[in-house]
Image (cartoon, grey):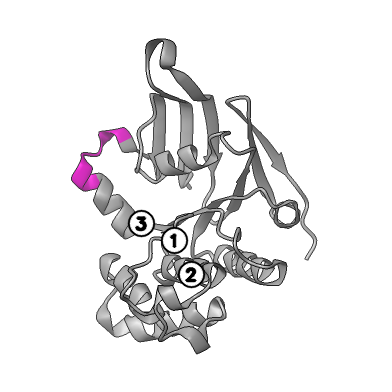
Amino acid sequence: MKPVVKVENVDKAFGSGDKKVEILNQINFSIEPYQLVALRGRSGSGKTTLLNMIGALDHPTAGEIYIEGTPISKYNEKQRSELRRTKMGFVFQSYGLVPLMTVEENIEFGLRIAGVPRGEWAAKIKESVDIVGLSKRSKHRPYELSGGEQQRVAVARAIASKPTLLLADEPTAELDSKMAFHIIQAFQELVKNRTTTIIMTTHDPNILEIIEHVYTLEDRKIDYRKKEIYV
């Protein structure tokens, strides 16, 4: 079985000449299907940059990223957009919710974009809202929710379509420890049920302790650590 993601000799730099800043250098790793993977590192280490490149939202300066064996660089912008729409789910730090839509409508909007048949929407909306514990807030709009609740809506929208690859940037940053563990458990279930492969960034040591596959970004390089997890 092909890796879902393969990153090969990837460099990333911003600027040029004297103002050139290298973020990532010769990054290599592969992620197998149905893994939950964490990227850790200090602020500015390149976690979000790497996530954005895997999600075809940004381009490497050098090297190649493969999604299910196909190099992203071969895609034109329309194909990259189609890849994101049909294969990927995203949780951004900015949440990216539509302000005038309710929780349910935001999730429905994500399902519509992903091309999920209309007949499946109601069940998928209910399931994802229940998973993140927002069933009593499902008719509220983002401005009526706390930051943590908005983050949970973003998670619900991303997981509702059960994408092949879920990319989550600090998905538990605004959550209390109890809800953070609840979300990670939901992620683990998606992986266990062979539904989704998940790559997330986090700096939370408690979350890192319960994730089996952890990559550390430091000094523009990447280091892998696999742990035995006892449940």
Pointers 1 and 2 in contact (C-beta within 8 Å): yes
Vertical comparison of 182 with 19: above or below: below
* Count of numbered circles on the image: 3
Which of marks 2 and 3 precedes in the sequence? Answer: 3
Res 138 quadrant in image: bottom left
Choose between 47 and 162: the one closer to the eye.
47
Return the residue at label 1. 95
Q: Secondary structure at mark 3?
A: helix
Three-letter amino acid code of the residue under disc 2? Gln
Marks 3/2: CA distance?
23 Å
Res 139 quadrant in image: bottom left
Q: Position of residue 60 (x, y in %)?
A: 39, 29
Q: Nearer the viewer, mark 1 or mark 3?
A: 1
Return the residue at label 2. 150
Pointers 1 and 3 in contact (C-beta within 8 Å): no
Q: Main secondary structure of the magenta part?
A: helix
Return the residue at label 3. 87
Whether residue 127 sits left or right of residue 72 in the image: it is right
Marks 1/2: CA distance?
7 Å
Magenta residues? Answer: 73-79
Q: What residue sits 30% from the left and 58% below the top?
A: 85
Q: Secondary structure at mark 2?
A: helix
Crowding near pointer 3: few (<14 within 10 Å), some, many (20+)?
some
